[in-house]
Amino acid sequence: DAGITQSPRHKVTETGTPVTLRCHQTENHRYMYWYRQDPGHGLRLIHYSYGVKDTDKGEVSDGYSVSRSKTEDFLLTLESATSSQTSVYFCAARQGMNTEAFFGQGTRLTVV
Amino acid sequence: AQSVTQPDIHITVSEGASLELRCNYSYGATPYLFWYVQSPGQGLQLLLKYFSGDTLVQGIKGFEAEFKRSQSSFNLRKPSVHWSDAAEYFCAVGPQGRSTLTFGKGTMLLVSP
């Protein structure tokens, strides 16, 4: 896992509630990413960060926000969870644009 | 539009047979290229990567991939598949000079006895 920890690993929440997923890395990676994985869609990029307080949107960013106040932590927030956000969420991190990304174990989120 | 395509959603291969998984990309310049593998319920593990130089790259678990600029392809190969290779395989592309890392939709490999 190259020192990437996601929490929680599983979560069930109700529609309309806020949810925050945490990604913590110990390798001082500059770049961090949040993906969601759904059958038939592969991994789709939600948001990414290229440094502390530097973030940008991916292809499926609607309904999600992120924050990175420290190098090691990248938070993904669903402001008001919807059933369409039921998914497995993966965090990834890498040192530079020309290096491979390392992944966390994923968070399975169910919105009921 | 920039994209990564894995044309095969599922592939079934007999144990001991050879394997080739296809990946095509659409980017202006040669991007950084990766293959990852995901076992059920697990995260993604890097198999191999291509940045520059020799177009045939070797990875872990006996996998290799060949970059073909003229075809915008980066196909993954293995000469003899083992039952433990059954998993989902993802091709990923990182455009040079950009922070993003884009994945294909994946190919599920099934290995038959």
Image (spheres, coloured by chain):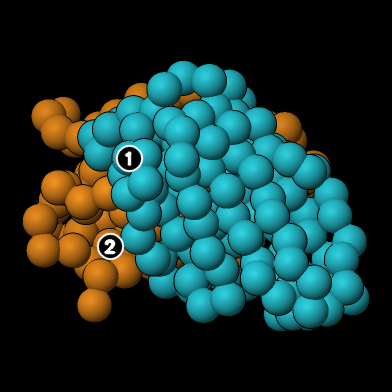
Chain colours: A cyan, B orange
Q: Residue at x 88, y 73 (%)?
A: A14
Query: Which mark's residue is nearer the viewer, 2 or 1?
Result: 1
Q: Residue at x 58, y 22 (%)?
A: A3
Cα separation between marks 2 and 1: 27 Å
Label 2 close to label 1 by CB (< 8 Å): no
Disc 2 secondary structure class? strand
**Number of residue marks:** 2
What percent of the width, then of the height, locates residue B10?
62, 63
Q: Is residue A4 left or right of residue B91?
A: right
The amino acid sitting under disc 1 is: Gly
Q: Is residue A7 left or right of residue A70?
A: right
Q: Residue at x 71, y 75 (%)?
A: A80
Q: Is residue B106 above or below residue A52?
A: below
For this rendering, which residue is in front, B20 or B106? B106
- Chain identifier of the residue bearing label 2 in the image: B
Q: Residue at x 28, y 33 (%)?
A: A96
For this rendering, which residue is in front, A25 or B42? A25
Give residue A88's quadrant in the image.
Answer: bottom right
- Chain identifier of the residue bearing label 1 in the image: A
Task: Return the residue at label 2.
Answer: B25
The amino acid sitting under disc 2 is: Tyr
What percent of the width, then of the height, locates residue A100?
37, 33
Disc 1 secondary structure class? strand
For this rendering, which residue is in front, A86 or B59? A86
What percent of the width, then of the height, locates residue A105?
69, 38
Residue B18 showing in the rendered view = no
Question: Which of the labelled discs sits on residue A87, or is there none?
Answer: none
Residue A33 showing in the rendered view = yes
For this rendering, which residue is in front, B70 or A98? A98
What percent of the width, then of the height, locates residue B82?
67, 32
Question: Which of the labelled discs sits on residue A51, or is there none?
Answer: 1
Q: Residues within 10 Å of mark 1 (few under 14, many from 20)?
A: some
